[in-house]
Amino acid sequence: MSELEDRIVAHHVGGRGFGVALNCPPNLAKHLVHVLYEADEICAREMIKENKNENFHVFPYCLGEYNRPGKIFITKNAYASSNLEPSQAYAKHYCELHLDGEVEGVMLQNAVYDVVYGNDNSVVDVRDVNICTLDYIMKATAVPQGLVPDFLSLDTQGSELNILKGGEQTFHNHCVALATEVEFHPMYKGQPLFSDIFDFALRHGFHFVGFTYLQEISPHRLPLGARAKGVVAFGDALFFRDIESVRAVARSQNELYLMLLKLAFIALNFGYLEFALQAVEAADATQADRQFRDRLLERDCYRLLDDLKRAVKELPACFPHVDRSKMIAERKAVLD
């Protein structure tokens, strides 16, 4: 078995703009390695030139379900580009976006603009691409050796399930968490929806834990003052691997210990403290080598988990009631 990679490795598909789903405090960033794939080769080559971060690796690969020729539809808003053609059924739909901060050199505060999908998603170019699978890339060592994904994130405008299917072996054997864009309406022709990705993840031992973002759209654009709720159309979904599933795929006690700590760190970064500490407890129960444990705890990211575990143990054992009738009786006794 190859040497285990101590750092958390995050693969992000749809890397335009260097946006990634897994972020952490700056003082811990050295413990994360990001591998970005961008299907638009022109964009990817520019990103490679611009990249000054040694923990970021950018590749001009278009990922999918099979190794085959394909197309990429470049849209007016380049971030909406996809292997799938935008659906004209949603051309009149829009969403209201709020912007703050610097955009194209201009500082904005509480700025609002409407994204009309028939405009932003209009196709301005169609390019030929060679689609390849994540499994193929891993086997061909087309990325730095050893950098298999612990965390996989997808933002590819409708082709996310195809990418998961093309990386099924890699996903099953290595990943402990998944963040993916999901749709509840088929805004691209022939695209799978949230339920399809949910079922795929569940089959591989991953549980849905929540949405990190949801976007409403509306088919009827009215002036400000006449707007209310829209319909939820798309968002970003987060999945964590079940601890028993991690135990099932780990090839050694050392790997199990490391995978559980990586799962804990990822969960903590998304705010899931209780699950993170549950994963730490499971890691402590493994039979990993003492020397291996000590080596990992030299890293701030894992030592933080150990410090949190110790801090929680020092808290008073104060819990809410689990028996509602006893709680009500206790409150009644106080009132009487």
Image (cartoon, rainbow, N blue to C red):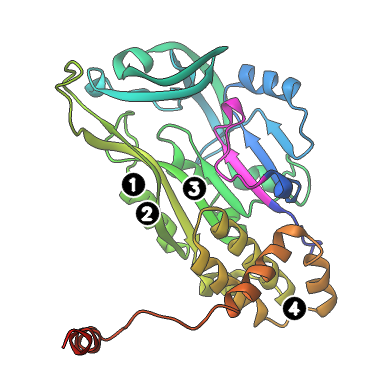
Looking at the picture, tell me which residue is in the foreground, 258 or 314.
314
The residue singled out by tag 2 in the image is 198
Q: Residue at x 34, y 36 (%)?
A: 191
The residue singled out by tag 1 in the image is 194
Q: Which amino acid type is marked by label 4?
A: Ala
Q: Nearer the viewer, mark 3 or mark 1?
A: 3
Residue 136 picture location, percent across and down:
64, 44
Dot label at residue 179: 3
Residue 333 picture location, percent across and down:
20, 90
What residue range appears in magenta? 9-25
Circle 4 packing at 10 Å, graded few (<14), some (14-19), many (20+), is some
Pointer 1 with pointer 2, Cβ within 8 A? yes
Q: Is residue 229 left or right of residue 134?
A: left
Q: CA distance from mark 2 to mark 4?
A: 32 Å
Dot label at residue 253: none
Q: Which amino acid type is marked by label 2?
A: Phe
Q: Which amino acid type is marked by label 3?
A: Ala
Q: Earlier in the sequence, mark 3 or mark 4?
A: 3
Q: Residue at x 73, y 21 (%)?
A: 50
Quadrant in which the C terminus appears: bottom left
Looking at the picture, tell me which residue is in the foreground, 319 or 260.
319
Is residue 71 placed above or below 288 in the rendered structure? Answer: above
Q: Nearer the viewer, mark 2 or mark 4?
A: 4
Dot label at residue 288: 4
Disc 1 secondary structure class:
helix
Res 287 quadrant in image = bottom right
Q: Is residue 288 magenta?
A: no
